[in-house]
Amino acid sequence: MKIGSLQLDNNIILAPMAGITDLPYRLIMKRFGAGLVFTEMISANGLFFNGAATRELLQTVAEERPLGIQLFGESADRLAEAARIVSPGGDLIDINLGCPVRKVVRSGAGSALLNDPSKVGQIVAAVRRATTLPVTIKLRSGWDQTSLNFLEIAHIAVEEGVDAITLHPRTRCQGFGGYANREHIRQLKERVAVPVIGSGDIFTVDDIKTMFIETGCDAVMIGRGGYGNPWLIQQALDAMAGRVPRQPDASDRFHVASQHLELFLDTFGPRKTLGHMRKHLCWYVRGLENSAAFRSAVNGARSVEEMRSTLQDFFAKVA
């Protein structure tokens, strides 16, 4: 898999996800074989005003490379300046044209840009001029079912020099509900010469296989399906190589959950760990007996030590 000048080891890619794809999460996913990992959405305005919280999102280490940095904003000039600022710390720049969150949309960024194709062209052109790194876009099919303009947006972006396109085939108005229409990805793949990355409703190895078969896409992006399940990446790579995918047992889950907890603690300290690792630990125990009791206990933990002991006690009983 090649995106512009960037050669990837494989075509299983971790999606950029706000509040999820911080450095510890990316390291876990990289260790399970992700060919490319992405930061959370980085605000171009936050970089312009040198916000500490925005800068924190850019933490990186050599182990996770190659790293894609996703930018969002409504101004071509500020997005171009953001690309110049972050380029030394990454290997690819992605422009978010798909975020459906109301706060982002109200600012004119994310999926709001789908309503202004000419502005998308200005943004891509400005970012393309600002960096020598590969430039990609991630978009949705359109604002709603009456304005499915993903092909128009894609053609404009390609004309302005984009190196690959990721399509999540839902509209902004769908949010994450309803049906992700893979036919849109197939249509996009037929119409553009750059690589197409398929996204949306990827939860199993069969979902990944189906995405490749039905759309002809060049790569698959894993988002929510990776929550508490980094094994999905390795399973997909095994299946594509003709190997039998291995299912994690309780010991595997405990080992990776513990590793994730300690990585987060080392990176961000105890206060942020206590607030942010609850959701991840709950995802790691999904489907296991007494997982509801674990969720209640870990969400009530008042220290990292209590969180750690709750995890240990749960898996001691599962084993």
Image (spheres, rainbow, N blue to C red):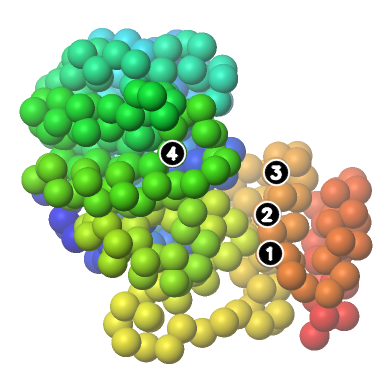
Viewer-proximal residue among 48 and 114: 114
Instruction: Tell me which label, 1 or 3, sits earlier in the chain.
Output: 3
- The location of residue 73, given as percent across then percent down, is 39, 18
Quadrant in which the C terminus appears? bottom right
Instruction: Tell me which label, 3 or 4, sits earlier in the chain.
Output: 4
Kindly report the distance in space between the C-alpha atoms of the residues bearing marks 2 and 4: 26 Å
- The location of residue 211, given as percent across then percent down, is 35, 61
- The location of residue 288, given as percent across then percent down, is 77, 73
- Quarter of the view holding residue 316: bottom right
Task: Say which of marks 1 and 3 sits in front.
Answer: 1
Q: Which residue is mark 3?
A: 276
Viewer-proximal residue among 191 and 120: 191
Q: Which residue is mark 4?
A: 170
Amino acid type at circle 1 is Tyr
Circle 2: element type = helix
Task: Say which of marks 3 and 4 sits in front.
Answer: 4
Viewer-proximal residue among 4 and 221: 221
Viewer-proximal residue among 170 and 318: 170
Q: Which mark is residue 280?
A: 2
Q: Which residue is mark 1?
A: 284
Residue at 39% across, 47% down: 181
Q: Which mark is residue 56?
A: none
